[in-house]
Image (spheres, rainbow, N blue to C red):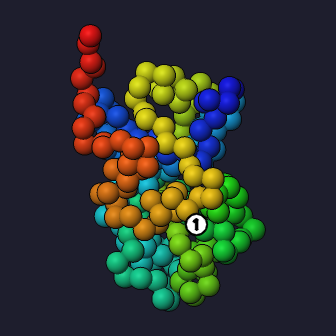
Amino acid sequence: MTAEFYLKNQFLLAMPGLAGSYFGDTLTLICEHNDEGAMGLIVNRPSSVTLIELMAQLSIDKGDTPADRVVVEGGPVGGDRGFILHTEDARFDGSLALGNGLMLSSAREVLEAIARSEGPEEYLVALGYAGWDAGQLEGEVAENAWLTCPADAAGELTREIVFRVPFEDRIRRAAASLGIDFSLISSQAGHA
């Protein structure tokens, strides 16, 4: 894998050509990318499931869980699997350090800690994930299906987009970090 295609900790912004597909209008954070493929979480598609409802399904006492916190659709693969993207201020045995101050976990203990107000300061719970086989994501990027947005070195912008920006504004905020007004990008190819 060449360095220019190493996309871990980068955002993928769905280009207009993906409109009408599952990935249309999505912003995906790539959590892992290696020679075997890539895995990411869509961070801007809220589901109809609240975190309290998910905890009830898992028989976890909701405790101090915010009533309005929603779970996002993380992607089309493994929709019955949950993932928690969170800040590194709380560490758990099953969490994977992603860099830029972020951790990823699928451990029940993270949700239990959140319910007890002992969890990470900022978190996003997702059901499912986006996955690509070896070379697949590189091909899609080369075909202009995705605009890539490198994460900032300190991770502050990434954490702002993932945890604080309203869902409907996340893709525009990521594009703006590149100096692009995403609403002006057309699905039509330009011709000289």
Residue carrying label 1 = 86
**Towards the viewer: 150 or 63:** 150
Res. 36 visible in picture: no
**Towards the viewer: 138 or 46:** 138
Q: Where is residue 130 in the image (x, y as percent from the top left)?
A: 49, 43
Identified by mark 1, the residue type is His
**Which residue corresponds to the image point at 56% horizontal and 77% vertical from the top-left?**
121
Where is 164 relative to 158, above or below?
Answer: below
Q: Residue furthest front?
A: 179
Q: Position of residue 25 (x, y in %)?
A: 31, 44
State which quadrant residue 183 falls in. top left
Res. 166 visible in picture: yes
Q: 84 left or right of 42?
A: right
**Which residue corresponds to the image point at 71% horizontal and 72% vertical from the top-left?**
91
In the picture, which quadrant includes the C terminus?
top left
**Towards the viewer: 114 or 33:** 33
